[in-house]
Amino acid sequence: MDYDVAIVGAGITGAAIARELSRYELKVLLLEKEAEPAFGVSKSNSGIIHAGTQNPPGSLKGRLCVEGNRLMRSEIASDLGLNFVQCGQLVVIFDKADIPELEKIKKDGETLGVAGLELVDRAWLDRHEPNLGPEVKAALRVPSAGIISPYRFVYALVENAVKNGVQLKTSAPLTAVGKARFGFELTAGGASYSCRFLVNAAGLRADDISALAGAPSFKIIPRKGEEYLLDKRREHIANHIIFPLPSKTSKGILIIKTSDGNPMIGPTAHDIEDKDDLATTDEGLAEVLAGARRMMPSISKSDIIAYFAGLRPTAGKDFIIRHEDSVPGLVNAAGIQSPGLTSAPAIAVMVAGILRDHGLELKPKKDFHRLRPRPAHLFQVPLEETRRLIEKDPAYGDIVCRCELVSAQEVRDAVKRGARTLDGVKFRTRAQAGRCHGGFCTTRIMKIMHEELGLPVTGITKRGPGSELIKDERK
């Protein structure tokens, strides 16, 4: 076999599994159909590290969410140099008659092991969330919830996995799966690979990959969520992540603090058929604004600087994480919708255990590199730290992106860490993510990418082949 394990999908789930397996003496392949990791489902994630409330106590997602939250707070964020902010969340109600519903969520959360839950009244909310509207009557406070950059979480996991020996292949869609004597023969991106175990973490395409491998046992239904990013000047509009009391099908329209400063409102939650439909709509905007403004009336349409939609891969009420006995060696990690980002480290441990139980020897590496240095981001550090960085390297004083305060050195570092597209730079650094949407900085970034990668400007893309910004008219 070329590899002990091949993982399909370099989103948050596949990246976490790759990093977990890199702890062991294994040959691991990570396949991604897009030009870079995190370009699928993970790119549209809200970045919430959930506490585990609002999931049924007996559910797999509830248990894995609580464990994933614990791993984030205790080791993942510090080991991988991530900016995790434990801001907590509030589940608010508009009618005191709904207090029993909050008490039920509190009881279910405590059953799952979520600590520190408390009901708070309007007087507490006035002190801690003064921008909440008069309709809000009370809330459940959940202190262990937090926020993180979903893209940088994925990149940190992938970078650390690669440092520990995982082979990453991008622009490599899996197109064929054949059975070998002791595993699988794969065709991906025009190349052939063999592996003993195949782990399917393909997000929206997980049902297609499972069927390709011979186990058509579930169907992915895309659940579309439209979200709207607010200007950074509204950064302090909320101190917590604000949830309404959830319905049977949705956690509702949220007001979301983000680790990068810009608040976000949304998402909608509507099941659709098209796995490529990422359009935002007037109806979605109206729904999100109405939901957000009921909780916080000061939010205005003029605060919005970016619109986007994401698709969550639903496959029933719970995650699908299992060995497919009908296809020995195939492990599915599918239907990983919310709280998938939080659960990913725990999912990875579970998948490693499934592989071990089906014959894969997990021999720990003596030289596993657990730590990843934290990249410098000027928008996250105090002014004194910025001065020290500039003294060390003047390129930190060369500001490429004015909206988000991103320096030339940060862009160069992002390229050296794996960015190969303009979106790859944006997701790692926030350059191009401000109100001007790259109007000032895009040409500077392209110049740096040209210098670092040797690519002609006509070869630099937004997110992979077909998204070139400059066309060569000679061709």
Image: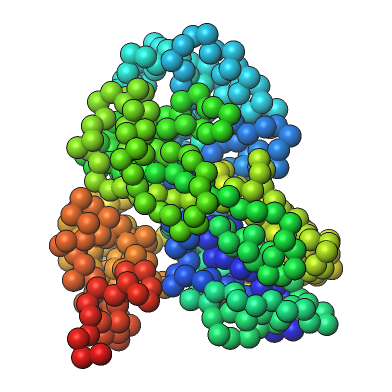
Answer left or right for 185 relative to 284. Answer: right
Residue 238 on image: x %, y %? 34, 30
Front-lying residue, 314 or 89: 314
Q: Quadrant of the N terminus?
A: bottom right
- 403 relative position to 31: left or right: left
Q: Quadrant of the C terminus?
A: bottom left
Mark yes or no: residue 451 visible. Answer: no
Which residue occupies 50% across, 57% down?
275
Left or right placement of residue 374 versus residue 304 in this view: right
From this viewpoint, is residue 318 visible? Answer: yes
Q: How many numbered marks have been drawn onto this rendered protein structure? A: 0
> Considering only vertical position in the picture, is 90 above or below 155?
above
Residue 188: image location, x then y, percent: 58, 79
Using the rendered view, name the quadrant where residue 467 is placed: bottom left
275 sits to left or right of 430 = right
User: Where does the image place residue 135, in percent across and percent down from the top left?
Assistant: 37, 14
Q: Residue at x 25, y 82 (%)?
A: 458
- Give residue 310's position: percent from left, percent from top: 44, 50
* Residue at the extreme front: 273
Which image quadrant is residue 229 in? top left
Q: Residue furthest left?
A: 440
What residue sits 40% from the left and 54% below the top? 278
Relative to 406, residue 253 above or below: above
Is the residue 214 above or below the residue 472 in the image? above
Q: Residue at x 78, y 82 (%)?
A: 180
